[in-house]
Image: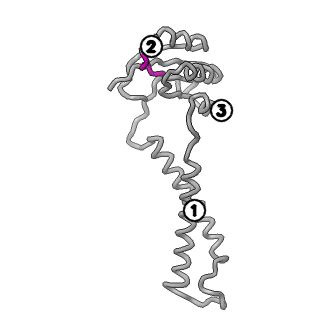
C-alpha cells in the first residue's frame, strides 16, 4: 500500500528539530527523520519512548553471568572434581573474574545483535534513502498525509516557516 508523504529537507539541525516539534504539536504523523549524524533532542521532538535496549543488555548480561557460574560450578564440583591445593570444589570467589568477563561478553554481543534485529539492519537489505543528500549534509523530515482535515498547503507552509530548503510531495511504496 502506498503512503502519501511530504518530505522536507533542511540545512541545519535546529530547523529540523523545530519543524518536528511543530508537526507533532499540530497532530501530524511523523514517519521518520533522517540525519547524517545523531541530533540531540530529536527523539523528544518526535515523541519517541525511551529505548528498551539497556534492559536487553542488563538481562542478557545477567543471564550470561548466571549460565557461566552454573557451568563453572558444574564443571569443577560435579562433572570433574579435582582437589587443587585444598580449595573447595565450589569456590565462588575464584569464579568472579571470569564471570565478569563472560557477563560483559554476553551483554555486549547480545545488545549489538538486538539492535541490528530491531533496527532491521540486515546484510541482504539495501538502504532506501528518501533524499540522496541525507548521508551528506541534509536533514530530512518525512510526514504522512493521512488526515484529510489538514490541507497539504498548510503542511508545506509549516515546513517553509522552519526554513525548509526543499519540499516534495510524493508516494512511498513503504517508509524508506
Q: Residue at x 63, y 87 (%)?
A: 88
User: Who is closer to the viewer here, 26 or 48?
Assistant: 26
Q: Which is in the foreground here, disc 3 or disc 1?
A: 1
- Asked whether 14 falls inside the magenta stretch, the response is no
Q: Is residue 40 above or below residue 98?
A: above
Whether tag 3 and tag 1 are in contact, CB under 8 A, the answer is no
User: Who is closer to the viewer here, 83 or 45?
Assistant: 45
Magenta-drawn segment: 143-147
In primary-sequence order, the first of circles 2 and 1 is 1
- Asked whether 145 falls inside the magenta stretch, the response is yes
Whether tag 2 and tag 3 are in contact, CB under 8 A, the answer is no
How far apart are labels 2 and 1 at the CA level? 50 Å
Q: Residue at x 64, y 31 (%)?
A: 41
Predominant SS along the magenta part: loop
Residue position marked by numbered label 2 in the rendering? 149
Q: Which mark is residue 62?
A: 1
Toward the left, the furthest residue is 1
Amino acid at each position: 500500500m502506498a503512503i502519501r508523504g511530504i518530505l522536507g529537507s533542511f540545512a541545519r539541525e535546529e530547523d529540523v528539530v523545530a519543524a518536528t516539534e511543530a508537526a507533532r504539536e499540530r497532530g501530524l504523523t511523523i514517519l521518520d527523520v533522517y540525519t547524517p549524524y545523531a541530533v540531540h533532542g530529536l527523539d523528544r521532538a518526535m515523541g519517541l519512548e525511551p529505548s528498551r535496549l539497556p534492559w536487553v543488555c542488563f538481562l542478557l548480561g545477567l543471564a550470561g553471568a548466571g549460565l557461566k557460574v552454573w557451568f563453572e560450578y558444574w564443571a569443577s564440583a560435579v562433572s570433574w572434581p579435582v582437589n587443587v591445593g585444598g580449595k573447595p570444589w565450589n569456590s565462588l570467589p575464584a569464579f568472579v573474574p571470569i564471570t565478569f568477563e563472560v557477563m560483559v561478553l554476553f551483554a555486549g554481543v547480545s545488545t549489538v545483535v538486538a539492535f541490528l534485529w530491531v533496527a532491521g539492519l540486515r546484510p541482504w537489505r539495501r538502504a532506501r534513502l528518501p533524499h540522496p543528500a541525507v548521508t551528506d549534509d541534509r536533514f530530512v523530515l518525512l510526514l504522512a498525509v493521512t488526515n484529510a482535515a489538514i490541507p497539504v498547503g498548510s503542511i508545506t507552509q509549516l515546513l517553509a516557516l522552519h526554513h525548509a530548503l526543499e519540499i516534495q510531495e510524493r508516494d512511498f511504496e513503504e517508509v524508506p
